[in-house]
């Protein structure tokens, strides 16, 4: 009986993890006239946010904008709006100094400006990290996709 229970638990864990991996696999439709975007500034919102998140969010956001064909390329584009991202990680009180990828939420203030510096769009994107450091990379990928959703929304 114990053997069957272990197999059942392993099967349930496998199905749960595989369903999380496919949670947001749909392809978003980018309306015409959106972008290209140049990431001009990425900064940490406070001293508690892990420094590695600067590179992580910037590279993942760049990658997803490139996948959707709306990342600025100096050889192709003359005009482009710029993105400013200010990243905050919200930690539980007990984990703040233990593991920097153990955050509960990622929050990014996104500011889109035209080439004259006028703000076109501004808002905050939030993503929950339910499994803390176990799925932090997945959460950061999801966060980049949420930034994309914000950029293509009306």
Image (tube, helix red, strand yellow):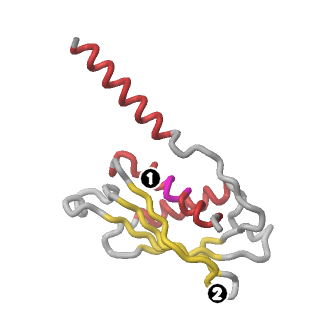
Q: Position of residue 108 (x, y in %)?
A: 46, 69
Task: Describe the element under mark 2 as helix, strand or loop.
Answer: loop
Q: Earlier in the sequence, mark 1 or mark 2?
A: 2
Characterize the local packing of mark 2: few (<14), some (14-19) or many (20 or more) Cα atoms within 10 angstroms. few
Give the residue at x 77% y 63%: 32
Q: Quadrant of the C terminus?
A: bottom right
Left or right of 130, for residue 76: right
Furthest toward the front, the residue is 154
Characterize the local packing of mark 1: few (<14), some (14-19) or many (20 or more) Cα atoms within 10 angstroms. many
Q: Which residues are magenta?
A: 141-145
Give the residue at x 50% y 53%: 142
User: Where on the picture, by quarter, is residue 87?
Assistant: bottom left
Magenta span contains residue 46: no
Left or right of 73, for residue 57: left
| Label 1 close to label 2 by CB (< 8 Å) | no
Q: Disc 1 to disc 2, how far (Cα)?
A: 31 Å
Magenta span contains residue 143: yes
Q: Quadrant of the N terminus?
A: top left
Give the residue at x 28% y 14%: 4
Q: Position of residue 31 (x, y in %)?
A: 73, 61
Furthest toward the left, the residue is 94
Furthest toward the top, the residue is 1
Left or right of 154, for residue 105: left
Q: Which mark is residue 118?
A: 2
Q: Position of residue 104 (x, y in %)?
A: 33, 58
Task: Describe the element under mark 1 as helix, strand or loop.
Answer: helix
Which of the pair 78/113 is nearer the observer? 113
Instruction: Tell me: residue 82, above or below residue 12.
Output: below
Most prominent secondary structure in the magenta stretch?
A: helix
Question: Which residue does the numbered mark 1 point to in the structure image?
Answer: 139
User: Where on the picture, by quarter, is residue 73?
Assistant: bottom right
């Amino acid at each position: 009986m114990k053997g069957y229970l272990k197999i059942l638990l392993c099967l349930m864990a496998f199905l749960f993890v595989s369903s999380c991996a496919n949670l947001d696999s749909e392809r978003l439709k980018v309306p015409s006239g959106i972008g290209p975007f140049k990431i001009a500034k990425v900064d940490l919102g406070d001293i508690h946010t892990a420094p590695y998140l600067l590179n992580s969010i910037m590279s993942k956001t760049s990658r997803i904008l490139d996948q959707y064909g709306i990342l600025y390329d100096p050889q192709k584009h003359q005009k482009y709006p710029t993105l400013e991202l200010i990243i905050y990680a919200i930690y539980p009180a007990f984990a703040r100094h233990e593991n920097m990828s153990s955050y509960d939420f990622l929050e990014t203030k996104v500011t889109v400006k035209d080439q004259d510096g006028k703000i076109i769009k501004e808002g905050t994107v939030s993503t929950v990290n339910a499994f803390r450091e176990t799925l932090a990379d997945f959460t950061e990928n999801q966060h980049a996709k949420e930034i994309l959703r914000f950029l293509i929304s009306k």
